[in-house]
Image: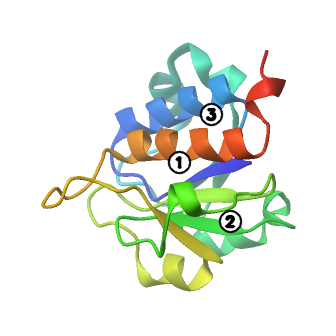
């Protein structure tokens, strides 16, 4: 199981995603360019003391991400407010990569076209969306439950 952020805009969200990935033992893919300078110093600042505990892969473009060795064999599952399936009704697999779009602009067409599936989190009508890392945590927790990964953490 992997988590991917597509061109993240907010350094603090990237830091929270790094911490989430480290604590839950999943790989994190960062699809660049980011909406902020992603230097080694900025990455260390965002990750705090979790940077060396997370398996983070940076990709210079979406094309580079799609052809990365880590991406072979699994589905790309888009987490989006208009996803085709409620995340609770979707059958996750261990090789899946959950990808989330930009905080400021959501998911562009290339994510929808590349994804083998899309899921949504049911929310109160009239509200726009969750924070991108909160959404990642909700869907990732269900994916880990379904694939038996929680039992392997302890």
Say which residue label 2 marks: 65
Q: What residue is rendered at 68% in x and 65% in y?
A: 65
Q: CA distance from mark 1 to mark 2?
A: 21 Å
Q: Nearer the viewer, mark 3 or mark 2?
A: 3
Q: Nearer the viewer, mark 3 or mark 1?
A: 1
Q: CA distance from mark 3 to mark 2?
A: 17 Å
In the picture, the disc for residue 139 is 1
Compared with residue 66, is residue 112 higher up or lower down, i.e. above or below? below
Give the structural element (helix, strand or loop) at label 3.
Answer: helix
Q: Residues within 10 Å of mark 3 (few under 14, many from 20)?
A: many
Label 1 vs 2, first from the N-terminus: 2
| Horizontal and vertical percent position of residue 145 | 68, 39
Query: Looking at the image, which is closer to me, 99 or 88?
Result: 88
Is any atom of residue 27 visible in this view? no
Q: Is residue 13 left or right of residue 128?
A: right
Q: Is residue 6 left or right of residue 126?
A: right
Q: What residue is rendered at 20% in x and 59% in y?
A: 128
Label 3 vs 2, first from the N-terminus: 3
Q: CA distance from mark 3 to mark 1?
A: 13 Å
Q: What residue is rendered at 59% in x and 68% in y?
A: 61
Q: Quick one: which residue is furthest to the left in this view?
A: 126
Q: Residues within 10 Å of mark 2 (few under 14, many from 20)?
A: many
Is any atom of residue 151 visible in this view? yes
Say which residue label 3 marks: 21
Quadrant that contains the C terminus: top right
Q: Nearer the viewer, mark 1 or mark 2?
A: 1
């Amino acid at each position: 199981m992997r988590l991917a952020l597509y061109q993240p805009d907010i350094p603090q969200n990237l830091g929270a995603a790094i911490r989430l990935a480290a604590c839950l033992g999943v790989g994190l893919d960062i699809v660049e360019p980011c909406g902020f300078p992603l230097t080694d110093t900025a990455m260390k600042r965002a990750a705090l003391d979790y940077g060396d505990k997370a398996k983070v892969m940076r990709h210079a473009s979406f094309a580079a991400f799609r052809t990365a060795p880590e991406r072979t064999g699994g589905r790309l599952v888009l987490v989006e407010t208009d996803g085709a399936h409620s995340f609770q009704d979707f059958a996750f697999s261990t090789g899946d990569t959950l990808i989330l779009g930009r905080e400021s602009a959501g998911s562009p067409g290339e994510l929808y076209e590349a994804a083998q599936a899309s899921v949504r989190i049911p929310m109160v009508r009239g509200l726009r969306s969750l924070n991108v890392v909160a959404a990642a945590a909700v869907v990732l927790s269900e994916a880990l439950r379904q694939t038996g990964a929680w039992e392997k953490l302890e």
